[in-house]
Image: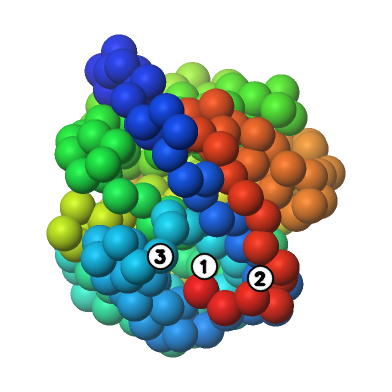
Amino acid sequence: MVNDRQTLDLKPFAGPAGGEAVEWLISDAPVPYPEAVAAMEARAADIAAHRAPELVWLLEHPPLYTSGTSGKAADLLDPRFPMFASGRGGQITYHGPGQRVAYAMLDLKRRRPDVRAYVAGLEEWIIRTLAAFNVRGERREDRVGVWVSRPDKGAGFEDKIAAIGVRLRRWVSFHGIAINVEPDLRHFDAIVPCGVADPRYGVTSLVDLGHPVSMADVDIALRQAFQQVFGAVESRLPEATV
């Protein structure tokens, strides 16, 4: 079933006219998960207190698993990498090299204080990014994330290509999205990804689908799609801190 969030009006998320541009930061080296969470929490507090502008932070993590607020211990089938408890929504997922993580720290109180619509905005951001590579990403009513149909695997088969997990504090968002560009998909075998055990539903990546794109290509598409959904951005130097 197609998710009815696709009918929501996302225009308010572009922010008020004349508002400050969102900072756009890309980290070249893998970022340890605890450091990323600490940096996000500090930045979200500064945004809420009007001490810092909004920020989108693109990065990769070293191989690891995270468990959201709905995570189940039984869904970790093989603890081959460290597991981190996360305050984001959702269940267990894998992060690692070849996956583009985009953490969005946005002031939803200023933009639109609506969690459901914000998730729809993140979905739209992913869908438009994938469209730049001629990949049709879709929402699903009963499953989180963005999915692609896989008729080559059989009738009704679909694979997840991007995950979503968010947290809000004082109406400032943090955590965000993760798009599989070229990760080692075997590492998803060690978990029940996001609690979805149905064998018809797997995990894929852009390269797995036959699109040999680089991380830089994806970053360009992410930036263009973000500006369409959420508004203008302003780049920061890679060595800058959050």
Q: Nearer the viewer, residue 36 or 190?
A: 36
- Nearer to me, 115 or 238: 238
Left or right: 191 in relation to 50: right
Determine the image quadrant of residue 60. Answer: bottom right
- Residue 120, quarter of the rendered image: top left
**Residue 174 at x, y = what percent?**
34, 60
Picture coordinates of residue 102, whole percent (x, y)? 52, 56
Q: SS for tag 3?
A: loop
* 145 to 40, vertically: above or below: above
Q: Which residue is mark 3?
A: 52
Colour logic: rainbow
Residue type, numbered disc 1: His
Q: Circle 1 sits on which residue?
A: 95
Mark earlier in primary sequence (1, 2): 2
Q: Which residue is mark 2?
A: 27
Residue that protrudes farthest toward the top in the picture: 7
Q: Residue at x 71, y 68 (%)?
A: 237
Tag of residue 211: none
Amino acid, disc 3: Ala
Front residue of this view, candidates 83 and 37: 37
Picture quadrant where residue 124 is located: top left
Tell me what residue is drawn at x 42 percent, y 78 percent: 39
Q: CA distance from mark 2 to mark 3?
A: 19 Å
- Residue depicted at 25% across the width and 66% down the height: 49
What amino acid is at disc 2? Answer: Ser
